[in-house]
Every structure is written in structure tokens, then in C-alpha cells.
Image: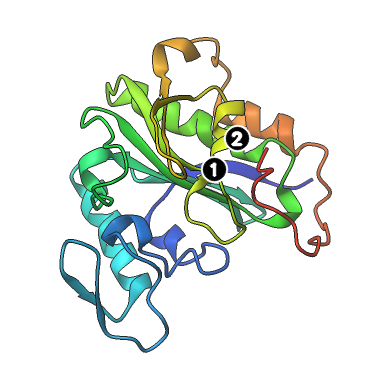
Amino acid sequence: MSRRRVTPLTSRICGQLPGRCGDCVFWELGSACPLPGSDRVLGDRGVRVTDGAGHKREWVSAHLAAGEDTGSAVVVDDEVVAYALFAPVPAFARRGSTVPRPSPTALQLATIFVRPAYRQQGVGRVLVHAAVRAAVRSRHPAVEAYGDRRFRERSCVLPATWLLHEGFEVVGEHPQTPLLRLDVRRTVRWSASLEDALAGVLGRVPRTVPEPVGASRARLP
């Protein structure tokens, strides 16, 4: 039987993130992933980065040391199969001036990535659950996230339609990237532990599942 758990996102877990997620600093610095060997200024914080993975680990370690959440990962048999990046709003780089600003008191759900073999099983919902529990624990009144109305597979922004399906509501309009919010007071019904929720959604997934070609992250659950 496979071993399943939800664990906090740490610098060690960052080194095991799927695909290019471990190198991506889109949310931490405000721009796209650095190309291999590149040396350029990313984001509005003016940080020059040649090692995205190293910067991500440092960012996670610094915020954990400050007592802040940085996200959660789903681990199956010691393999990271999904993760969520979330933290207090001020921890992330500010987005462009044309998109709605998140509330400074909210916990921001930046992104979720699920390996193709584990999609459409409810794993994304477990990670939303983890973000809500972190918000309650740290006394944030809500979880906020940007949604992409024209979602593409490799986007770092979550599909707006999926966030709406998970109970988020639009609080800041934008043609492509609206701001959505989930009030944690509406989630008191989520009383089960994360481990129980994970067992429920992954209990029917075989230990070895071929990854479908061209699977879309827009159907995360």
C-alpha cells in the first residue's frame, strides 16, 4: 500500500518539486522562470538571479524562519506528486499595476501544480484545504488567489474556472486575471484532517499510473 502524506513546503521539498517548479520564481520575484545560464533582473524587487532553485529555497527558508507558511506538498511513496505555494500577501512580489491588489491581511494562494498522473482525483482540493487551514492557524480572514481566464498548461496562475468551482468568488475584476477570494469562515465544514482527505482522493489511484499526453492543468481536481 502506498504511503501518502501532506507535508509543509520546506527548502528540502523544493529540491523535489516536479518539472520546472523547483526553478520557478514567478511569484517570489514577479517574473518568468530564469532561462538556464541567464543573468537578468527579475521582478520589481531588482534581484539578479542566476539560480532560480537556490533563490526559491532561500525564500522558503527565510519565511519559515519568520514563522510564516510557504505552502504544502503531497508526497506519495517519497515522491512529491503535487504542491501548493501560499504565504501572506506581503511575502510575494507585487504584480503589475493593472491587476487588482490582494488584501494585505489575506493568505495568498499563488499556485498549485499536480503531476498529470494524479489530476482529476481531488488532489488540488486537498491543497486548497491545506491553504485554508494555514489561514485559520495564522488568523488570516481569507485566502485570495489570482485566476487566469485564458488558462494555458504552463501558466503559473491557476485557472479561474477551477477556483470558482472550489468556492472562491471574484472580488477584483480583470479581463484576464481577476482576483478571487475564499472567506475562511465559510469553510468550517472542512473538519477532516488533511491525511484523511488525501487518503480519500488518492485511495483509488494505483501506485503506478502512466502520465497522459497533453493533460491539462485546468482540470486540477
Residue 171 is situated, as x and y percent measured from the top left of the image, at 38, 25
Observer-nearest of 212 and 8: 212
177 w.r.t. 200: above or below: below
User: Do labels 2 and 1 touch, CB within 8 Å?
Assistant: yes
Q: In this rendering, would 193 be left or right of 105?
A: right
- Which dot, 2 or 1, sits closer to the camera? 1
Residue 119 spot, x, y in % from top left = 71, 47
Residue ID for mark 1: 149
Query: Residue extending furthest bottom?
Result: 37
Which of the image's four quarters has the C terminus?
top right
SS of the residue at dot 1? loop
N-terminal of the pair, mark 2 or mark 1, is: 1
Report if residue 67 is visible in the image. Answer: no
Placement of 132 over or under 112, stated as above or below? above
The amino acid marked with disc number 1 is Arg
Q: What is the CA distance from the residue labelled 2 to the residue labelled 1?
A: 7 Å
| 132 left or right of 40 in image | right
Residue 180 appears left or right of 101: right
| Local crowd size for mark 1, using a 10 Å CA cut-off: few (<14), some (14–19), many (≥20) | some
Figure coloring: rainbow
Furthest residue to the front?
A: 175
Residue under pointer 2: 161
Give neighbour class at mark 2: few <14, some 14-19, many 20+ (Cα, 10 Å): some
* Residue 178: percent from left, percent from top: 42, 37
Q: Is residue 112 above or below residue 193?
A: below
